[in-house]
């Protein structure tokens, strides 16, 4: 069974957790857009807001439906916003007839109840076709041994054809910052293909931030020397774990994907319980009680530390959680943001080599 890092994929920033549906044909000669939307879930908002470029627009919501009309010169990253929500999901806006379906849910963050919104589906855009093409390639090839080579070849062609589309910049930012499959030279080469003047500035900033990390916190580099408090306030550092393979897991109690991965980590801890393998969980929670309650509820039996001000994450340039680093016995990074399956294989190989 192929284990794919799809959850880390470029959709981390655009239409996160979105089911993408493409139309059969995309009429790219259209000079205006129509954006029809529907909202599912409890909401009291009377207006929906659309942000793209320097434009801010609003329309009235009637029967949980809304519709925007306008035009864009090029495909741009846009945001849909409801005043009651704590976030504004992003998607690609282009001159086409687009339908977008949104859900509003309640969540708990830092001890407070908030409303979040996410995009369920996007239909009718050329951008959806590009996303579908790339995701299909990724799913079909991610389990192959020469995947990095295949991915680089695919993206060289893809970027050459779509060098102006912001989705290309999003892919590059994701590969540089979150999903380090390609090396620095490959990423730099792909960057040179893009029409930078057409790319979204936030993607370019994330790409540059990721590239900078290749010189510091990449495979083969020593991990950051740190000291953080545990539940009892004791400062704990990495020196305590020298001689062991260590998984550093960045998470938070309010992060649903993080909590969903915890059973996998528990399984890994149990599997290697009799061997030199440890897990250190580092949370960005600001509410200490919520953090300790989550540790107890999820039965996290490993060392748990609190990076309340995110100083460590900011130093390392970590943007999204969950995120992890796998370290060897000397504290050298041997894996970045691995899946549970990849962690299992790397740990097994490392322990065999050690013996």
Image: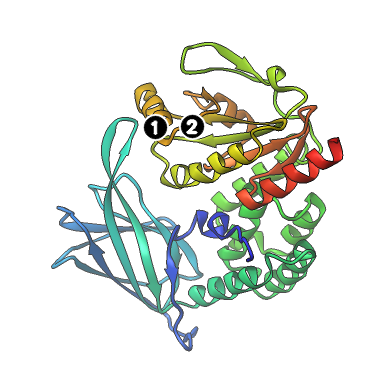
The structure residue drawn at horizontal position 72% and vertical position 71%, both measured from the top left corner, is: 154
Given residues 300 and 129, the one toward you in this image is 300
The structure residue drawn at horizontal position 30% and vertical position 30%, both measured from the top left corner, is: 111
Q: Is residue 148 left or right of residue 49?
A: right
Given residues 171 and 42, the one toward you in this image is 42
Spatial distance from mark 2 to mark 1, Cα to Cα?
8 Å
Above/below status of 80 relative to 289? below
Q: Is residue 101 left or right of residue 77?
A: left
Which label sits on residue 263? none
Q: Disc 1 on helix, strand or loop? A: helix
Above/below status of 11 relative to 94? above
Residue 130 placed where, x, y %? 56, 74
On the image, numbered disc 2 is attached to which residue? 300
Above/below status of 120 relative to 108? below
Q: Residues within 10 Å of mark 1 (few under 14, many from 20)?
A: some
Given residues 185 and 50, the one toward you in this image is 185
Q: Is residue 274 left or right of residue 200?
A: right
Q: Residues within 10 Å of mark 2 (few under 14, many from 20)?
A: some
Give the image quarter of residue 315: top right
Viewport quadrant of the C terminus = top right
Q: Disc 2 on helix, strand or loop? A: loop
Residue 227 placed where, x, y %? 61, 17
On the image, numbered disc 1 is attached to which residue? 294
Residue with the most extreme front position: 274
Q: Is residue 228 left or right of residue 104?
A: right
Taking the image as drawn, is residue 319 in sight? no
Taking the image as drawn, is residue 284 in sight? yes
Give the image quarter of residue 313: top right
Residue 324 placed where, x, y %? 61, 40
- Which one is earlier in the sequence, the residue at label 2 or at label 1? 1
């Amino acid at each position: 069974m192929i284990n794919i890092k799809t959850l880390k994929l470029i959709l981390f920033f655009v239409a996160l957790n979105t089911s993408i549906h493409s139309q059969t044909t995309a009429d790219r000669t259209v000079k205006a857009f129509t954006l029809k939307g529907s909202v599912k879930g409890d909401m009291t908002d009377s207006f929906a807001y659309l942000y793209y470029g320097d434009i801010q627009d609003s329309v009235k919501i009637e029967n949980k439906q809304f519709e925007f009309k306008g035009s864009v010169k090029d495909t741009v990253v846009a945001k849909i916003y409801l005043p009651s929500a704590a976030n504004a999901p992003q998607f690609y806006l282009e001159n086409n007839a687009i339908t977008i379906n949104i859900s509003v849910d309640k969540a708990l963050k830092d001890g407070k109840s908030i409303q979040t919104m996410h995009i369920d589906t996007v239909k009718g855009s050329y951008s959806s076709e590009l996303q579908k093409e790339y995701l299909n390639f990724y799913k079909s090839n991610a389990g192959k041994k020469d995947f990095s080579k295949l991915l680089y070849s695919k993206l060289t062609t893809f970027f050459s054809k779509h060098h102006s589309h912001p989705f290309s910049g999003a892919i590059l930012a994701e590969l540089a910052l979150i999903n380090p499959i390609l090396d620095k030279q490959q990423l730099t080469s792909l960057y040179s293909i893009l029409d930078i003047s057409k790319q979204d500035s936030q993607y370019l900033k994330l790409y540059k931030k990721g590239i900078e990390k290749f010189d510091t916190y990449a495979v083969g580099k020593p991990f950051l020397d740190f000291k953080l408090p545990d539940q009892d306030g004791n400062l704990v550092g990495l020196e305590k774990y020298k001689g062991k393979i260590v998984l550093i897991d960045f998470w938070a109690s309010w992060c649903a994907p993080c909590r969903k991965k915890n059973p996998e980590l528990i399984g890994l801890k149990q599997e290697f319980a009799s061997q030199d393998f440890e897990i250190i969980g580092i949370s960005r929670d600001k509410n200490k009680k919520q953090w300790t309650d989550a540790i107890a509820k999820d039965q996290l039996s490993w060392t748990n530390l609190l990076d309340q001000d995110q100083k460590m994450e900011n130093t390392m340039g970590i943007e999204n959680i969950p995120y992890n680093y796998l370290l060897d016995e000397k504290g050298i990074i041997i894996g970045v943001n691995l899946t549970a399956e990849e962690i299992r294989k790397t740990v097994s190989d490392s322990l065999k080599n050690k013996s």
